[in-house]
Image (cartoon, rainbow, N blue to C red):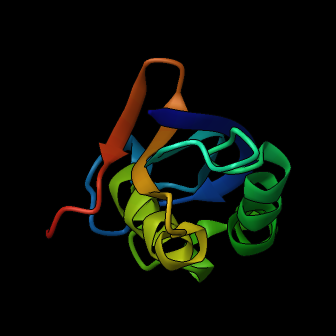
């Protein structure tokens, strides 16, 4: 079973290793989707949505929302943001009955990435 929680954050970035429009400073309203895979516990939940929201808020959104992402990642592409989020959450959400399954980072309504913890 997959548990899904969506979030939004606003941030600016530029891509110094990219040559095109996105090498200039610009911003997005990002959509972040966090997915956990697991089995419901005795309470009937993989993880309480409130608990997951708090983890994401403390470890991810508090750092990324209204930030210049280049101060956090040298090349803050959607791909690199997804890996960074995964690293922040993977150990935190692991329980006997669940684990992090997938991170989605959407820069726009039509452009995003999915990361499942695979080696790069």
The N terminus: image quadrant = top left
Q: With respect to residue 1, does 84 lie above or below?
A: below
Where residue 57 sits in the image (x, y, percent)? 80, 62
Q: Using residue 97 as the reference point, say whether residue 7 is left or right of it.
A: right
- Residue under the image location 69 percent in, 49 percent down: 42
In this view, the residue in front, 109 or 3, is 3
In this view, the residue in front, 103 or 9, is 103
In this view, the residue in front, 13 or 2, is 2
The C terminus: image quadrant = bottom left
Quarter of the image for residue 69 reads: bottom right
Q: Using residue 49 as the reference point, say whether residue 32 is left or right of it.
A: left
Quarter of the image for residue 33 reads: top right
Q: With respect to residue 50, does 68 lie above or below?
A: below
Q: Residue furthest top?
A: 110
- Residue under the image location 46 percent in, 47 percent down: 38
Q: With respect to residue 6, does 13 lie above or below?
A: below
Where residue 43 sits in the image (x, y, percent)? 76, 45
Where residue 113 sits in the image (x, y, percent)? 35, 40
Q: Using residue 56 as the reference point, say whether residue 116 is left or right of it.
A: left
Q: Residue furthest left?
A: 120
- Residue under the image location 45 percent in, 75 percent down: 87
In this view, the residue in front, 81 or 76, is 81
Quarter of the image for residue 61 reads: bottom right
Where residue 21 sits in the image (x, y, percent)? 40, 42
* Number of numbered discs overlaid on the protein picture: 0
């Amino acid at each position: 079973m997959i548990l899904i929680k969506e979030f939004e954050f606003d941030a600016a970035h530029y891509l110094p290793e990219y040559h095109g429009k996105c090498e200039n400073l610009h911003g997005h309203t990002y959509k972040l989707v966090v997915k956990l895979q697991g089995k419901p516990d005795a309470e009937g939940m993989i993880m309480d949505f409130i608990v997951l929201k708090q983890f994401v808020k403390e470890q991810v959104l508090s750092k990324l929302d209204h930030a210049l992402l280049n101060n956090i990642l040298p090349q803050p592409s959607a791909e690199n943001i997804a890996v960074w989020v995964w690293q922040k959450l993977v150990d935190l959400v692991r329980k006997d009955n669940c684990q992090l399954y997938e991170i989605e980072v959407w820069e726009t309504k039509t452009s995003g990435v999915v990361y499942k913890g695979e080696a790069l």
